[in-house]
Image: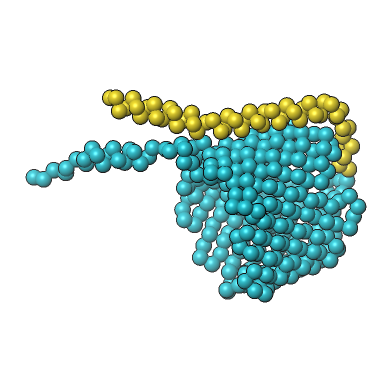
Amino acid sequence: MFPGMFMRKPDKAAALKQLKSHAAMFGAWVVVIRVTPYVLHFLSTEKEELKLEL
Amino acid sequence: MATPIPPPPAAAAAAAADTKVDYLNLPCPIPFEELHREAMMSLKPDLFEGMRFDFTKMLNQKFSLNHSVLMGPTEVPSQSTETIKIPTAHYEFGSTFIDHPRLLLWGRILTDGRLNARVKCDLSENLTFKANAQLTNEPHMSHAMINFDYKGKDYRTQFQLGNGALLGASYIQSVTQHLSLGGEVFWAGQHRKSGIGYAARYNTDKSVATGQVASTGMVLLSYVQKVSEKVSLASEFMCNYLSRDVTASFGYDYILRQCRLRGKIDSNGCVAAFLEERLNMGLNFILSAELDHRKKDYKFGFGLTVGE
């Protein structure tokens, strides 16, 4: 039948620990995505300033 | 003798300035769940086997009724590798209410008692509520899921709740004019399993490339190229590095004035084609074919659609 139905459930504490780890990774990734446009904006502005100086 | 005048440098500077990206005014990306939308349209048409008849009647601008009949063999799960099919017939009654763009109500019920229902409602300008349910007579086989979608200036975020203590969240945001990055996290409380996924999408006017990985072992890559106004070519690579399943698919989407033809071939030896032809205003003819040479499973279907 369906092997997944009979898989043993992981220990609750270990599962919650893994969930916290995944949630933390997700939050960090969201922060990285959020910051990326501002970093690119800063870099492009800096480049523009250099260009103006030339 | 006359010589061409070189273009003025101001115009060149203006042209260069036009290509400069404004990182503080990026477009809003498409929803996370529709990341592979273009590839799905080409590679996963609504294939069926047997005879299909759909009749849609608009009662007024917002409300419509739908009657569907499907007659043909249905595959039965079996222990052996051989495919077992039994002849079946279904009648499905449906109703749809659309108060564009704020509210959508959709329902379908089959003669065996299965019910499908969907709701989409704009709670505010940026917040959307979605729900879908599948109810059956069999115990413990009904499912329901609700979503809250929030649309920001250059990002979208979503929160999901499902029965079986299912929880999910996703986030997608534009980082350049053409590139979007996203992620998701999910928890299946009944099985005490959690997972995380990452996704990226790069799209231009002519092509779309997407990639997605998840801690469940799923890897999905797709690329769609618009060859001309009428022809799109699509490819997809799907694999699970835990179970070692690998599939590569290639397909096309050909849109002509009166018909649309889609087809695909994949590395599992499956060849499929799907033709929708408009015979008249509100009358469509459908041909469907799927040949699974490895499983020796061959499916052919034809159908008629009446109404919009």
Residue drawn at x 47%, y 47% as measured from the top left:
B206
Q: Is residue B207 left or right of residue B13?
A: right
Q: Nearer the viewer, residue B276 or B106?
A: B106
Is residue B177 visible to the viewer in this orientation of the structure?
no
Q: Which residue is drawn at 72% across and 50% down?
A: B292
Q: Chain A is drawn in which colour?
A: yellow
Q: Position of residue B57 (x, y in %)?
A: 68, 73
Is B290 rendered above or below residue B239?
Answer: below
The answer to whether residue B240 is above or below residue B51 is above
Q: In which quarter of the image is residue B63?
A: bottom right
Q: Which colour scheme is used?
A: by chain
Q: Which residue is at 62% across, 30% downward?
A: A29
The answer to which of B259 and A8 lies nearer the viewer is A8
Q: B189 above or below A54?
A: below
Quadrant, the N terminus of chain B: top left
Q: Which chain is cyan?
A: B
* Residue B19 seen by the camera: yes
Tell me the quarter of the image containing the C terminus of chain B: bottom right
Quadrant in the picture for residue B278: bottom right
State the residue in front, B55 or B130. Answer: B130
